[in-house]
Image (cartoon, rainbow, N blue to C red):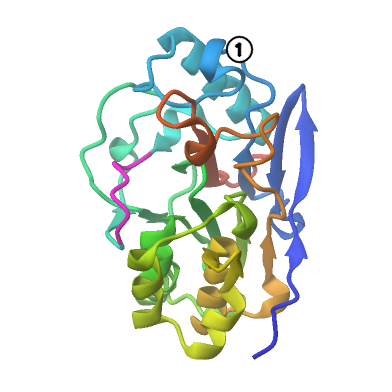
Amino acid sequence: MHRPNVAALVRRDRDGVLYTTSAQLEREDLAAGFATRVGGVSGGCWQGLNFSFSSGDDEQCVRENYARFCRALGAPQQGLIRAWQVHSDNIVVVTDRAQCLGPSPQTPPDRADILMTNLPGVALTTFYADCVPVLLFDPVHRAVANVHAGWRGASIRNARTAVAKMSELYRTDPADLLAAVGPAVCAGCYEVGEEVCEAFEETFEPGERELIFSHVDGRPHVDLKLANVLTLLAAGLCEQNIAASTDCTAHMSQLYFSHRRMGERRGNQIALICLREEGEAK
């Protein structure tokens, strides 16, 4: 099995807010990107662009961080929606803008790791600090999804679940989908144990496991970003329609918060995707 040759994400700086995105997702009818920690107002262990209200950071700082990132992407703050991430393949389908909470410390009502919609003005968000965020866009039927895929999500191939649900709801042809696999911990920084190895053995083919697993000093490491790319290909996406980050959240400490590096005392990045209203441009 060959290693996929996908494009790299590109970095963008808008008014001091640094983020990454896929060049294919830079469109007038779409807002999409992965935040770094650069460009925010938080201090201390949350230094920079922290989006977590529950981490101990000052609420007004977090609200300002949302405002800055949304301005940089051209996304509506009041259209923000998120879920309580539980490392699953649970799906929230946004069918009403009333589901959107905006930037709020309120606990989201849904436990899920996949968000999707075909409503303009709804900004789907997931949080990451080593796990893999995956953004999906159907330019034919104008629908989007945002997937949170750490090792548990990747091992159950929840990105494929998202693609299948988009096909069911929006008549999406996987071959039309554009995908961006965001920043996450790299294989070199991600040593794993027996539980993780067994989880991937159950759902990934031997040829796929040969690509995503490596060994350092006899200890297994897994490439979560590549695992998600392989899942997208297995779901029917075209290789040329996928872009993936080359950034590592664990060892690029000036750019990213990392659970593996920092533990619980840290901030969170967000991934965001939003269909713009017709006639609206960034």
- Secondary structure at badge 1 equals loop
For the point 38% across and 38% down, the residue is: 81
112 relative to 135 in the view: left or right = left
If the image is split into quadrants, where does the C terminus sit? Answer: top right
The residue at which mark 1 appears reads as 41
Residue 215, above or below 130: below
248 relative to 277 in the view: left or right = right
Q: Position of residue 69 (x, y in %)?
A: 61, 28
Asked whether residue 9 is in view, the answer is: yes
Q: Position of residue 163 (x, y in %)?
A: 44, 72
For the point 51% across and 11% down, the residue is: 61
Residue 203, above or below 217: below
For the point 46% across and 8% down, the residue is: 60
164 part of magenta stretch: no
Count how many numbered circles sit on residues in the image.
1
Q: Position of residue 42 (x, y in %)?
A: 56, 13
- Residue 202 falls in image quadrant: bottom left
Q: Which residues are magenta?
A: 82-88
Q: Rate crowding at label 1 as few (under 14), some (14 to 19) or many (20 or more) other CA atoms within 10 Å.
A: some
For the point 44% across and 57% down, the residue is: 149
Q: Nearer the viewer, residue 123 or 108?
A: 108
Asked whether residue 157 is in view, the answer is: no
If the image is split into quadrants, where does the N terminus sit? Answer: bottom right
Q: Main secondary structure of the magenta part?
A: loop
Residue 60, above or below 45: above
Type of amino acid at the residue the image marks with label 1: Val
Q: Position of residue 43 (x, y in %)?
A: 57, 10
Residue extending farthest to the front is 217
Q: Nearer the viewer, residue 182 or 170?
A: 182
